[in-house]
Amino acid sequence: MTFVGQAKRPPRYVIHQLLWQAADWLYPPVCGGCDAPGERWCAKCQEQTVLLENMAICPHCGVPNHGGEICTDCAAQPPPYTALRSWAVYAGALRKAIHRLKYQGDLGLGEALGAKLVAMWQSLDWQVEMIIPIPLSAQRKRERGYNQSSLLARPLSLATRLPLCALALRRTRDTASQVKLTGSERRQNVRGAFTADARQVAGRAVLLIDDVATTGATMLAAGEALQAAGAHNIYALTLARAGLTNHPDSLTG
């Protein structure tokens, strides 16, 4: 596992953090989760966030269940990725913050919340060689002006010294918003929507980064494209997990 601890943070990661601290000094931020002044992500919102790190989960798709065993879906059809993990439940303050990051141009949340993925990485014994953010379609990228997954992936790339390869995976067609679609509709919506560059990924272990996983349909489609291009091993990491009823411990996988 490639990771540099707090005492020996790579210079580029330190500079990245210092630049955002300077921006916060010049333009005092408000919390992305509650609008409290002074921080982009405050301690109160952090305390209210339900973390998934200590819950029993399916070792493949990362969905919480009671026994920590392979869920029925993954047993019936193993995903193309080795493992998918998420930092926290997509609810409350975290949901609001991700919405602000995606749709309201609050770019500082990419660094503030991306730091959570950096901290989470330390507990994952994953051997990867490159980081790939889930891409937007060209049309959506033009409309939004940025890719929120890239903003979350950059701090992890800088902290681990793993290359951020944003062009290794392309979304080759625009897809409908996944928000109101069922699980089967989500899978159909993104099926065949990605193409991977075999020159960059063939024979290599890769890490996919996205903001939210719900049914995992996007990660499945992206993983299939990487697998077809010859990626040796595929892992996936998201900031949040949606679609969890009430409390994640109530799920059975």
Image (spheres, rainbow, N blue to C red):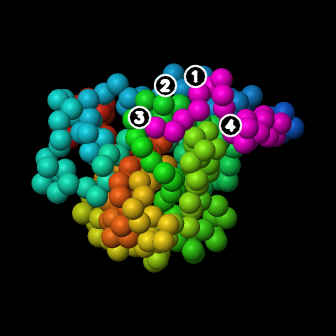
**Residue occupied by mark 3:** 124
Q: Nearer the viewer, mark 2 or mark 3?
A: 3
Q: Mark 4 or 3 closer to N-term?
A: 4
Quick one: 148 or 144, which is closer to the camera? Answer: 148
Seen at 25% across and 55% down, the residue is 79
Q: Which residue is mark 2?
A: 48
**Closer mark to the observer between disc 1 and disc 3:** 3
> Given contact means CB atoms under 8 Å apart, are the residues at marks 2 and 1 in contact?
yes
**Which mark is first along the chain, 3 or 1?**
1
Q: Is disc 1 placed on a helix, strand or loop?
A: helix
Q: Disc 4 marks which residue?
A: 10
- The residue depicted at 70 percent of the width and 30 percent of the height is 39
Question: How many discs mark residues in the rendered view?
Answer: 4
Vertical relation: 140 (above or below) 65? below
Q: Earlier in the sequence, mark 2 or mark 3?
A: 2
Q: In whole angstroms, how far apart are the C-alphas of marks 1 and 3?
A: 26 Å
Would you say the residues marked 4 and 3 are in contact, meaning their CB atoms lie under 8 Å apart?
Answer: no
Q: Magenta stretch?
A: 1-24
